[in-house]
Amino acid sequence: MEEYPEELRTPPLTLTSILGYPQLHSLISTHLLSCQPPINTLALPHFSKINLFNTKTHQSYDPSTTLVGGILKRDWLLKHRTQIPSVVAPIFPSQHVFGDPAQWLQLCSDLDSIKTVIHGRNIKLAVIIVQTNAQDEVSDERMIALRKRAEVDAKYVFTLNPNDNSELKQSLNSLANIFSELASTYYREEGRRIKQRIEKKNVSSVELIVRYCFKVAVYAEFRSDWAEALKFYQEAYHTLREIVGVTTRLPAVQRLVEIKSISEQLHFKISTLLLHSGKVTEAVTWFRQHKNVYRRLVGVPEATFIHWEWMSRQFLVFGELLETSAITTQSFSPVVSSSKPLSDWEYYPAYYYQLAAHYLSEKREALELAISMSETSSEIDSGADSVVPSVYVGQFARLLEQGDNVDMLPITDEEYTRYAVSEGRRFRDSLEIIALQKKAYESYSSMKIERMGSYCGFQMAKEYFTEGDINNAKQIFDSIACLYRKEGWVTLLWDVLGYLRECSRKNGTVKEFLEYSLEMAALPITSDIGVQRDTGPAGPANLLRRETIQKEVLNLVNEASGSATNKNLSNFKFSGGEPLQLEVDLVSPLRLVMFASVAFHEQAIKPGTSTLITVSLLSHLPVTVEIDQLEIQFNQSDCNIFIVNAQKPRLVEVSDIQQHRVETVSSLSLESNKWLRLTYDIKSDQSGKLDCLVVLAKIGPQFTICCRAESPASLESLPLWTSEDSVQTVPLKDPVLVLSGQKSTQVEDQDPGVDLHLDASGPALVGEIFMVPVTVVSKGHDVYSGELKINLVDVKGGVLFSPRDSEPYSTDSHHVELLGISGPEGEDDSQLDPDKIKKIQQSFGLISIPFLKNGDSWSCKLEIKWHRPKPIMLYVSLGYTPYSDESNTQMVHVHKNLQIEGHAAIVLNHHFLMPFRRDPLLLSRNKQALESDQSESLPLNQKTVLIVSAKNCTELPLRLKSISIEAEDDIGERTCSIQHANVGLSDPALIVPGQEFKKVFLVSSDLNILKLRLGTMVLRWRRDLGVEEKSASAAKLSWAVTKQKLPDMNVELPPLIVSLECPPYAILGDPFTYYIRILNQTELLQEVKYSLADAQSFVLSGYHNDTLHVLPKSEHILSYKLVPLATGIQQLPRFSMTSVRYSAAYQPSNPSNSVFVFPSKPQFKNAASTNFRVESVAVIE
């Protein structure tokens, strides 16, 4: 479509012209071009340029006597789009209109000149007056005189003020509307004038009717009347068909060229209008009619290439139009007509690209024939340089220059044919064919139409092959061959493989040549399909050709000298010392050539016992293949078997195979479509899986086919042969093996002669080192090269941790870890031999065990530590060999496992208490009720009681050595003091299951800091040994350590401290004094509201509620007399207090607000105190 001129490819735009006042040309032109539809502007700076339009008049035209030189002038459409405007608008300043009379006279003269010129072409006139100042005087008389002088209506005299920005855009829009209206009038009148000629039918030739219809259609397009344009384009097209065999104005060849050229333009216009209006089906139907009408107008034999080139261009252009149209072409309604209905392919652009390439191939063949019919190349080129396109579409003439004069002389058909041949030789049609086939291939591929896409790809690859671009051709052929193999298209695959075989021959790649050749020879083709077609280098697809190809391959690989004798294969040569091997796997196309089925007769065998194995080979090659040697390879190389053909010389030296088993057979002939079955016994001394890997078939001294072994039970059929009528056979005669046979068998482990014992004393406790004894007892085998592997695995199947050698050890990231392996008593790491192995990781351990004779035993202990309560599975695996011979590496394995529960031993808790009956008023406690995340606070300069408790959560008795609070390493300065922090117990305390042990610490701080870092609670404990507790040596006892960090505490100065003082006990009926002390620790006067509630057990004297003021740094004492009325523990009158300044309330706890009342005065005896008071103070830094 790019070959067409732009004026034909794009819709015509209205052309107007403005004269004079060039300062406004850019403004007006830009605005008109931005309108919808756009308007082109021809800007002329001076009125004298109006004479450019003075080239035609209508008065002397007589169609009945007009001589027709051609149908359509080549530049007519371009001239009306770029040279002949529909509207002319002179621009005059307002001073020339309303000012000096001399200027008015000049304006009138310019208008007369313009009218004289445009009258001959019926061009419309509009006048633009530029008023730069809105205050300029406007004369109505002059305006009337101007309209009369210009002979235009008042609305076509337009006033424009370029300085009025607010009204400028609206003025320009009004000007555009005026131009659009006048242009539409111009094109309508021109079209009506031409239509009158058609209606009168007063013409000298039918060619003029075609010309007139074309012009009417173009004028309709100018005013966007698409329906009328389509109507007259179709009228011109039908009229042109009527003059095909009538006109004799030009010689036969040139006459046909002119008609086809004009029909091509008309068809392009019609198709464009139909597609852009959404009438895709109508456009496709129109193209089919166009193609059918002109397909038979081939012309003389010498110029048929011109016709095929024209046909190719029709398909190409319509395909591009169909592709670029805005209407989707995914679904169409069927078209029912008297002719053949439209197919779905005709709606795809790829269909037209494909046929465009086909007709271009026809053109190339016809052009080559025309060139061959010419005597010499100089005869073709003679005079071709002086032939140029004529002034009419589709016509050519000879350019004759005589001095300054240039004449266009008519030419004969012979001269035009030589010119066309010369032009055809300048272009390489193969490149264009490749481009077209590529577009069709990509289009089909994008729509997932693989089969048609592969056909186009095949044609494209053939062109690459013809051009000598072997690499590109081979790449495309390979991709197409994959599809044809999958689809099972044997005949098409034959042709593609023939080209691939030829590509490899040209590239000199012998391996690929053999692969493609053998695949071709193994295709299921027995006879010709009976259709004459171009098979390319593959030749006819029949049995004889298959046999010929196979014999070529066998002759090539059997040449003792290493080079081929066939002249077509003379560039192939095997490299000495580098044998050639073809791989045949489960998806290889070479499975047609040969594939191997291997079946063990037993699925499991004992070490050292033999079983049978059957190897079956099948080939679809047409000629029997003589195999020189077979090699069956296993994953255990000691089991490999060499099978030698007795009729062939041995290809493997004795020194190479003396370590392997060699079998000799009388013949290794692999007949076509017949199984070659070989059965042998086989045994293995190594436990594990015995798997047959490959079967290698040697043919000739340097050629090998390596077939991946396949199991009969999972044997897949060959897709290309399943649809054939050949009898399907099975690789084995035993029907059971056919269904269940596998290419591998399991060699069981040797029965172990060693016992492995694991023992564990109850559950493990978090924090302690748990010992697991492991004992190895030999009961029938000597133990050589023994290795003990230990694995710790989560019971739920997860991992305990992910150890990395580069990462430092961290107990926080490991739940359970293996600390070490201790050997028998008296053995340490220094006594191990240098070749002994001992490797410990967090969840894995490996240790070598010494040589053990039959009946000996060896033991060790696994040291495992739990950091978190978690059950684990302990796996211990013993691997050894019962043979002292190092060449025998067969290992015997013994596996044992043991589940061990991990429990938490000690649970540590703590809480803080204030001194008895002395409570500070902490302001933060009032906020805790509103803020749940507020941490607890301690008073500054006051002693606080810290109670630490340790509870035995196990079912075992424990011994407690000490409870201490240790400082953290990163504390840089003293923050508090803790009494009894590091004091241990004189004797380990026994804690029975469920019992709780408590220890009291006193915490105080006199530093004005925000956070108090107390340290870490450290508990040292172990299991109780029971009866062995007294006899155990203290030096050998191992103590477990449990740590728990104490939370950081806020420290604040309490503004008020309330102390309650009363006797330690009371006597029924005896009065006592109850003191309440309120201490103000601030520098401010504190107002306090208090109340004392009545109690049923006491008689109270004093104020029940009041408000008092406590001086700064002073204490206020309240005293009450109380008389007990009941015995036992009685609640004192409850005291409550509110600080007015802080809006903080205080109320003592229940334990501090009670006292015991005796019925009478008790009698106490003095006894020696056995308590030991520790007064040491530990400082945490």
Image (spheres, rainbow, N blue to C red):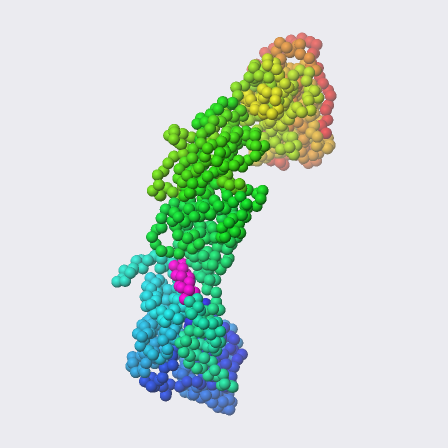
Task: Tell me which corner region of the image, top left, top right, bottom left or bottom right, holds residue 1072.
Answer: top right
The answer to which of 1047 and 485 lies nearer the viewer is 485
Indicate yes or no whether the magenta region holds residue 361.
Answer: yes
Q: Main secondary structure of the magenta part?
A: helix
Asked whether, in this view, residue 1016 is left or right of residue 640, the answer is right
In terms of image quadrants, where is residue 866? top right
Query: In this rendering, does residue 264 appear at all?
Result: no
Residue for point 34% across, 79% down: 248
Query: Magenta residues?
Result: 350-366
Out of 1087 and 1113, give the one closest to the viewer. 1113
Quarter of the image for residue 1153 reads: top right
**Residue 308 to residue 1052: above or below:** below
Seen at 33% across and 58% down, the residue is 343
Q: Nearer the viewer, residue 282 or 552?
A: 552
Question: Would you place residue 880 above or below residue 220 in this image?
Answer: above
Q: Position of residue 127 (x, y in %)?
A: 45, 82
Task: Please say whether residue 793 is one of the residues in the magenta stretch.
Answer: no
Place of residue 1097 in the rendered image (x, y in percent of width and height, measured from the top left): 56, 18
Residue 44 sits above or below residue 596 on the image: below
Horizontal side, residue 1112 vs residue 115: left or right: right
Quarter of the rendering occupied by the N terminus: bottom left
- Residue extending furthest toward the left: 338
Tell me: residue 959, above or below residue 326.
above
Q: Residue at x 50, y 85 (%)?
A: 402
User: Picture coordinates of residue 5 (x, y %)?
Assistant: 45, 71
Of residues 459 and 502, the one nearer the viewer is 502
Query: Looking at the image, which residue is at 46% across and 47% down?
Result: 552
